[in-house]
Image (cartoon, rainbow, N blue to C red):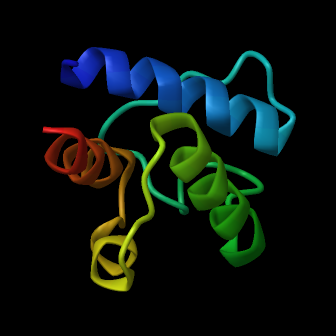
Amino acid sequence: MEKQEVLKTLNEIFAKVLKKPDLCLAERMSTDDIDGWDSLTNMIIISEIEKRFEFHLKMRDIIRMRTVGDMCNVILKRIA
């Protein structure tokens, strides 16, 4: 799986959780850039990532995920 595929999947997850069907994520985006992405929705997003990619994230991985690009990198590392 390539980074663009992971980004597309993340976009689907974010759109569903945040109820923003026309959301378009970019790797550099963070909680400051996306309305509704707060600590509670972040935990829901993490749960959805774990379900979709069929693995459990470690706390150190979650802490590293400050941007959408960071999320992509952590996911790619876990599925490699």
Of residues 29 and 69, the one nearer the viewer is 69
Q: Which residue is at a point 28% across and 83% down the rendered structure image?
A: 60
**Left or right, residue 7 beside residue 10:** left
Of residues 17 and 29, the one nearer the viewer is 17
Q: Which residue is at a point 54% across and 46% down the rendered structure image?
A: 49
Q: Which residue is at a point 56% across and 36% down the rendered structure image?
A: 52
Looking at this view, name the residue that lies furthest to the front. 54
Looking at this view, name the residue that lies furthest to the right. 19
Residue 79, given in percent of the width and then of the height, sits at: 23, 40
Q: Which residue is at a point 45% across and 38% down the rendered structure image?
A: 53
Q: Quadrant of the N terminus?
A: top left
Residue 59, given in percent of the width and then of the height, sits at: 38, 83
**Left or right, residue 21 beside residue 1:** right
Indicate the quadrant where residue 39 lies. Answer: bottom right
**Left or right, residue 54 beside residue 28:** right
Q: Quadrant of the C terminus?
A: top left
Check the image and report above or below for 63 versus 20.
Answer: below
Check the image and report above or below for 70 versus 7.
Answer: below
**Left or right, residue 31 beside residue 8:** right
